[in-house]
Image (cartoon, helix red, strand yellow):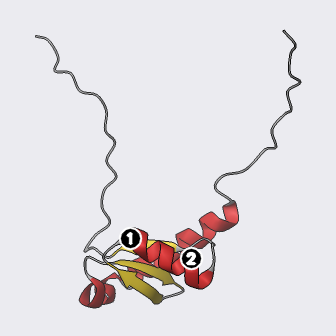
């Protein structure tokens, strides 16, 4: 059995700090405009950039595909317009404690 030489993988920083900064900036702008966005886009997914809604749809996947077709594959801020940010949910196995 011959041993295959192993290559050291290139170190990749994920997510890219530039992309993270972009997303954080868009999230702040989105939060500042949330009340206004709720009036027009409540319950919809929006592609949001620099204070503007570029496109919207009830179907997140359809929205992303359409936006990629129009603008090419690049980072984009897509968010569902809700009164407040949903809280993340972490699911773990649960077993009742024995007493």
Q: Residues within 10 Å of mark 1 (few under 14, many from 20)?
A: some
Identify the residue at image location x=57%, y=80%.
Answer: 69
Relative image position of residue 83 (x, y in whole percent) = 25, 74
* Distance Cα–Cα, label 1 vs label 2: 12 Å
Quarter location, residue 63: bottom left
Residue 99 location, x and y as percent? 10, 10
What number is the disc on residue 34? none
**Left or right of 23 in this view: 35:** left
Which residue is at 38% across, 70% downward? 60
Q: Which residue is mark 2?
A: 68
Q: Where on the picture, by quarter, is residue 16?
A: bottom right
Quarter of the image with the N terminus in it:
top right
Q: Is residue 73 above or below residue 3?
A: below
* Residue 75 in view here: yes
Q: Label 1 belongs to which residue?
A: 60
**Residue at the spot 29% in from the left edge and 85% down from the top edge:** 41
Sequence-first tag of 1 and 2: 1
Q: Residue furthest left?
A: 99
Assign a secondary structure to mark 2.
helix
* Residue count near mark 2 (Cα–Cα under 10 Å), binned few <14, some 14–19, many ≥20: some
* Above or below for 93 versus 73: above
Q: Nearer the viewer, residue 90 or 68?
A: 68
């Amino acid at each position: 059995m011959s041993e295959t030489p192993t290559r050291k993988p290139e170190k990749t920083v994920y997510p890219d700090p530039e992309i993270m900064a972009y997303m954080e900036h868009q999230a702040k702008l989105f939060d500042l405009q949330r009340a206004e966005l709720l009036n027009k886009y409540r319950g919809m997914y929006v592609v949001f950039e620099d204070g503007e809604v570029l496109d919207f749809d009830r179907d997140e996947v359809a929205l992303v595909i359409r936006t990629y077709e129009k603008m090419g594959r690049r980072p984009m801020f897509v968010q569902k317009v809700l009164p407040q940010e949903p809280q993340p949910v972490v699911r773990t196995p649960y077993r009742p404690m024995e007493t």
